[in-house]
Amino acid sequence: MMGLPGDMTSDKSGAYRPEGIASKLLNLIHDAGAEMVLEVGCGTGHWLTILQDQTQVIGIDQSLGMLSKAVEQKGNFSLVQGNASLLPFQRKSFDMVYCVNALHHFKDPSGFITQAYELLKDYGVLALIGMNPHALQDRWFIYDYFPGTLEADLKRYPSPGTIADWMITAGFGEIRWQVAEHLLNDRHGDEVLSLTREFTSQLMLLSPEEFAKGKARLEADLRNAEKTGETIVFPVDISLSMVTGWVKGGPIQK
């Protein structure tokens, strides 16, 4: 697969591992002195396996299919089937709650943030990581060749400012924003010919007809480039944002 940030899968080698996100999550565990951590929208458990040696981690996801893949990893973490609209945990159960590329899938993201505040202990932290198309700085060939994908992302991905507002309303303090990961993974020439709708969630939102039209545009440009001996570069230059909010002001006051 040719992975991209909408779902974070793989690079050309098939094993894309964004180190920036991992290091930032590990730093937050240290800053919060986190002994109990919850990932909401844990998917196949990729981030749980990275954090499991540093703290006790629990992952929750609505998809049983995703959770079954997480179970296959046989990691030292716990898994729960459920959704972000009704988290089945007691108040003040966690030192840290985080989501990576999941918030835009939640039916009520602001309501989730309010729930997360209730789940966190004093001086706990919520970290939300995802794309920020609102900055209009990303360069991604999916947006170039498939009309409607950028517009859809602008609707479904809340901006860091919106997330910060939701955090303030929920009661969080010491709210910070930073770039969690800068993804540079350009595709060259016919590397994109294997593109399918399953490549990333942005394409899954398109109808089969819309996807076919975009794929035809891409293939036409490849044919024209071949005639002139050129190799087209299909850009992947995307930044993932991280917004963090702390309960009772954050680690500085611990």
Image (cartoon, rainbow, N blue to C red):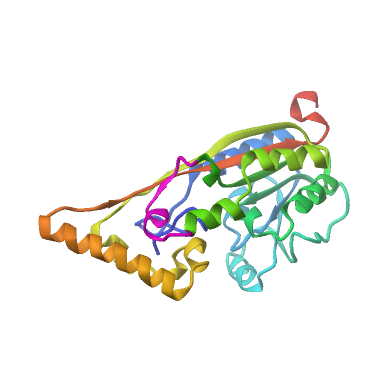
Left or right relative to 67: residue 248: right
Q: Is residue 178 left or right of residue 14?
A: right
Determine the residue located farthest toward the left in the rendered image.
228
Question: From this viewpoint, is residue 101 visible?
Answer: no
Report the residue at 37% width, 49% height from top. 185
Q: Can you give x and y, in whole percent of width and height, for residue 89 in the image?
A: 84, 57
Q: Which residue lies furthest to the right in this view?
A: 91
**Residue 27 placement: quadrant:** top right
Q: Give the range drawn in magenta.
A: 136-148
| Horizontal and vertical percent position of residue 198 | 46, 69
- Identify the image quadrant of the C terminus: top right
Q: Name the spot of residue 229 as percent of width and height, x first.
A: 11, 55
Where in the figure is residue 168, as x and y percent of width and height? 78, 37
| Residue situated furthest top in the rendering | 252
Horizontal side of 181 relative to 70 (left or right) equals left
Q: Does the magenta stretch include residue 147?
A: yes
Whether residue 244 is visible to the viewer of this picture, yes or no, is yes
Tell me how many marks there are.
0
**Left or right: 85 with respect to 18?**
right
The answer to which of 8 and 140 lies nearer the viewer is 140
Q: In this view, does 127 lie above or below 217?
A: above
- Determine which quarter of the picture holds residue 174: top right
Residue 14 covered by magenta stretch: no
Q: Nearer the viewer, residue 94 or 248?
A: 248
Q: In which quarter of the image is the N terminus?
A: bottom left
* Residue occupying the point 41% across, 69% down: 211
